[in-house]
Amino acid sequence: MKPTLKALVLAVGAAGLLSLGGCAATSMALAHKDLDVQSYTDGVLILPDSTDHTYALSVRNATKIPLNDALIKTEVEQRMQSKGYTETTPDKAEYVINLVTYTAEVDSAAAGIGNNGGILAGAAAGGINGNGQAALIGALVGGIGDTVAGGLVKDVTLTMRSVIQVGVRQAAAVKSETNSTLQQGDSTVQTQQAASVGDRMNYRVKVITTADQTNLKLVDAIPQMENGLARNVAGLF
């Protein structure tokens, strides 16, 4: 029995739709095949200059991402030394530097043709002869194909947020006041204030570090992200 023109058109259309999932996966793989790491400060921070080029450094990771704090510290030290700075203890340092990474988020987008395209293509292929059961089976097969194509290729982006705080020694006393508001239950709010006097003016800037690649592996991205953090710290001086 020869297929009708309608059946041929539906078959060609279904085959084209089923291929879109693979095409989307291939396009994503090619567009994000290279590891792209970016690290930049969120804002501008200009520190006061000083003839005393001594510093103290603390590095801390408060996320579940396995950063090597000791390695970041070593990279910062090497960059600072190349600029003529010397590391010492916090009580003797002109600049007290604290680097804290406080959030890390992973965003994973799978490739696919969207809008249940694989399912629709499968249903069309199964329903060429007007068979409802065949259309259902086709929809299931198409959906599985779309899921597999998208599941194998993912554009993964890791975003880390850090803060660099630099305390600069001052000749005069520095008065600081801290205000905080605490929520107590559903209707009570508690406000607290604390004042202190010290010898340092604190400056702070955020650092955004991202890594993007198809099927990103942390073991490949983390060393470059650590290097980006170190570069941002030393770049303030």
Image (cartoon, helix red, strand yellow):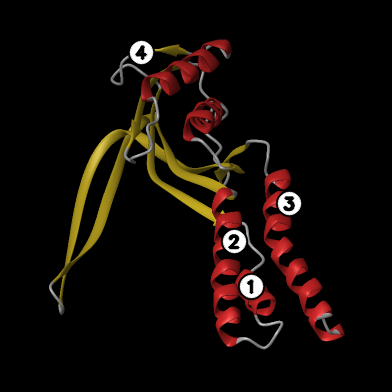
Helix or strand or loop: what does disc 4 sit on?
A: loop
Q: Amino acid at mark 1?
A: Gly
Depth check, front residue: 136 or 187: 136
Q: Amino acid at mark 3?
A: Ser
Of badges 3 and 4, nearer the viewer stands 3
Mark 3 and mark 4: span between their CA atoms?
A: 51 Å
The residue sitting at the right extreme is: 5
Residue under pointer 4:
88
Whichever of callouts 3 and 2 sits on the residue coming sooner in the sequence is 3
Of badges 4 and 2, nearer the viewer stands 2
Mark 3 and mark 2: span between their CA atoms?
A: 17 Å
- Check the image and report above or below for 97 versus 87: below
Residue under pointer 3:
27
Residue appearing at x 54%, y 53% in the figure? 151
Q: Give the image quarter of residue 72.
A: top left
Image mark for residue 163: none
Mark 4 and mark 2: span between their CA atoms?
A: 60 Å
Answer whether labels 3 and 2 touch (C-beta < 8 Å). Answer: no
